[in-house]
Structure formats: C-alpha cells, structure tokens
Image: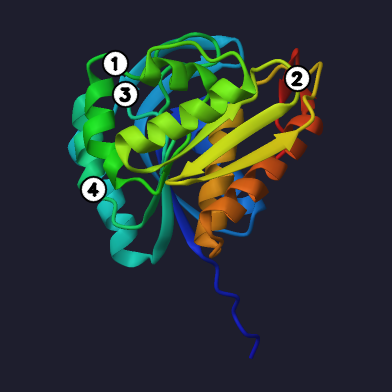
C-alpha cells in the first residue's frame, strides 16, 4: 500500500478578492505552492478587480468564528494568519478563536486606496489581536498609521520595528518595499533585529504582495521554521512572485 504524505495545515482568516490577486484567493494559492494544506475563514466579500474595489459586505462575526471552530475541530492547524478583518465585531470573534501561531497582517488600506478596516476598529486590533500574535506584519503605510509619523529611510524603518515591538510586546516585521532603493524588511523580536534585503523590481505594478508575504510566512511557520527563518523564506518567495509576474489582460498578477 502506498504511504500517504502528511501535510501541515494552515488557516487564513481574511476577505475574498473576486479578482483573485489578494485575500483568501492569494493566501490559498500560496499555501498550496509551499506544500501546506490551506483552510480558510472568510471575513468579508469584496467586489473588486486589479483596478479597485467597488463594494464590501462583511460576514456575520458568529459565522466567522464558526468557520474557524469547524476547521480547528477537525484539522491540526499549525499556523494561522489574518488579513482583512473589516470591523470591531469580527476582530473580537477572531481573537477568541485562534489558539496556534498567528501572523497578523494589519490590512488597513488596499493598494487602490480603498479602506479595508473601519477607523474605530484600529484601536481594537491593537489592544485585542496584536497581543495574541506571533508576529505583526505592517507595510510602510500601515506602520506610519500605527506610529503616527512618516518613515522615509531604512534607519527609520529599523526604529519603527523596534518601537512597535516594544509598544505592543510582540514581534513586528515592517515591510519597506515602498522606500527608495532596495526592498528592505525589518523584523524585531524583542532585542534582536533582522533585515531582509532584496533588489527592487521595477516595471511591475500589482497588488496582493502583502497577502502573499504573510501567507508564505504562515506556511513556513506551519512547516516548522522559526520566525526569522520563516520571514527570510517568505521574503524570497514574494520577491520571486513579483519578478516572475504574468500579464493578465492589462494588469500584472503575481506568479505563485
């Protein structure tokens, strides 16, 4: 009899992207590419394509929590990630449901500029969900919102990671892909700083990079990597996805 291969399980808790480039769709494709069995809890339905979002409908928080419960009841989830959570009630439902290693991608605003988290929910995200996280992965704009100041240099990026990690008592990985020069990400785990540096890839305009990065990080945690190693592997994965991006009509899509 052929021996069955055991796959680690990861869970994404995020919104659905009808255009397929970000959200649940990107997360599940990333899990599959990295050899992890992907499960999901959908928090919101977005009506979108690569050009932008026209409408959002949130899912009842009770249904969000029940999706998580049913997955975890039957499957050994090793790591989970959050993406778009949209409102306070959904954040509270998620915070009380996840018991494994958790990557929190604080999705505040889409690449197109559409707001994906209600303003009043930002405080609840910080006070309830951040403390439950293994790591929080804001991009440059999100880190600026959390800090209330601008970030323009790699030195300021390092300081941002240190400040946020100290403030919330959890590891922070601040992504500096929108800074001038190379694409540098900084991870602060208490007293240790790690930097992940890749050449900037010009001429590719796409969305979903933050989702793919956090999903890849989650997948590597599920595979048993320590946080710094998982972050380095996720950085390499998303860099290759951008470098090998494919044309879909008039747009680019990450090659996952």
Q: Residues within 10 Å of mark 3 (few under 14, many from 20)?
A: many
Q: Contact (CB < 8 A) between labels 4 and 2? A: no
Give the percent coordinates (x, y) of residue 228: 57, 52
Residue underneath mark 3: 86
Which quadrant holds residue 185? top right
Nearer-N-terminus badge (3/4): 4
According to the picture, the residue beneath numbered tag 2 turns out to be: 181
Q: Earlier in the sequence, mark 3 or mark 2?
A: 3
Residue 138 appears in the figure: no
Q: Dot 2, how many residues are within 10 Å of its Cα: few (below 14), some (14-19), or many (20+)? A: few
Task: State which mark lies toward you, 4 or 2.
Answer: 2
Residue 165 position, x and y percent, is 39, 37
Q: Closer to the N terminus: mark 4 or mark 1? A: 4
Which is more foreground, mark 3 or mark 2?
A: 2
Q: Are marks 1 and 3 in contact (CB under 8 Å)?
A: yes
Q: Which residue is mark 1?
A: 118
Q: Could you tell me which residue is drawn at 39 percent across and 31 percent down? A: 164
Marks 3/4: CA–CA distance: 17 Å
Residue 9 badge: none
Helix, strand or loop at mark 3: loop
Between label 4 and label 1, give the one nearer the viewer: 1
Q: Residue 66: which numbered mark, if any? A: 4
* Residue at the image position 66 percent from the left and 51 percent from the top: 33
Instruction: Give the Cα separation between the discs numbered 1 and 3.
Output: 6 Å
Q: CA distance from mark 4 to mark 1?
A: 22 Å
Quadrant assignment for the C terminus: top right
The crowding category of the residue bearing disc 4, from other C-alpha atoms within 10 Å (few below 14, some 14 to 19, many at least 20), is some
Q: Give me the residue at 63% from left, 91% from top.
A: 1
Total label count?
Answer: 4
């Amino acid at each position: 009899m052929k021996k069955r291969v055991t796959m680690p399980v990861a869970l994404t808790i995020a919104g659905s992207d009808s255009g397929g480039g970000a959200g649940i769709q990107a997360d599940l494709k990333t899990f599959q590419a990295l050899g992890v069995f992907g499960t999901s809890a959908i928090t919101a339905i977005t009506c979108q394509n690569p050009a932008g979002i026209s409408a959002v409908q949130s899912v009842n928080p009770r249904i969000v929590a029940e999706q998580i419960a049913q997955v975890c009841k039957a499957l050994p989830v090793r790591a989970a990630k959050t993406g778009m959570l949209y409102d306070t009630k959904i954040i509270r439902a998620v915070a009380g449901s996840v018991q494994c290693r958790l990557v929190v991608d604080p999705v505040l605003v889409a690449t197109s500029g559409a707001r994906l988290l209600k303003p009043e929910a930002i405080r609840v995200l910080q006070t309830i969900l951040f403390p439950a996280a293994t790591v929080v992965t804001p991009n440059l704009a999100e880190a600026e919102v959390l800090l209330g100041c601008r970030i323009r240099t790699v030195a300021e990026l390092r300081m941002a990671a240190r400040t946020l990690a100290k403030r919330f008592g959890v590891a922070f990985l601040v992504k500096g892909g929108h800074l001038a020069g190379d694409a540098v990400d900084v991870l602060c785990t208490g007293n240790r700083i790690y930097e992940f540096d890749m050449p900037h890839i010009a001429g590719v305009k796409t969305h979903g990079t933050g989702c793919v990065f956090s999903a890849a990080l989650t997948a590597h945690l599920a595979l048993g990597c320590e946080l710094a190693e998982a972050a380095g592997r996720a950085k390499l994965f998303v860099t290759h996805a951008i470098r090998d991006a494919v044309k879909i009509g008039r747009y680019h899509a990450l090659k996952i």
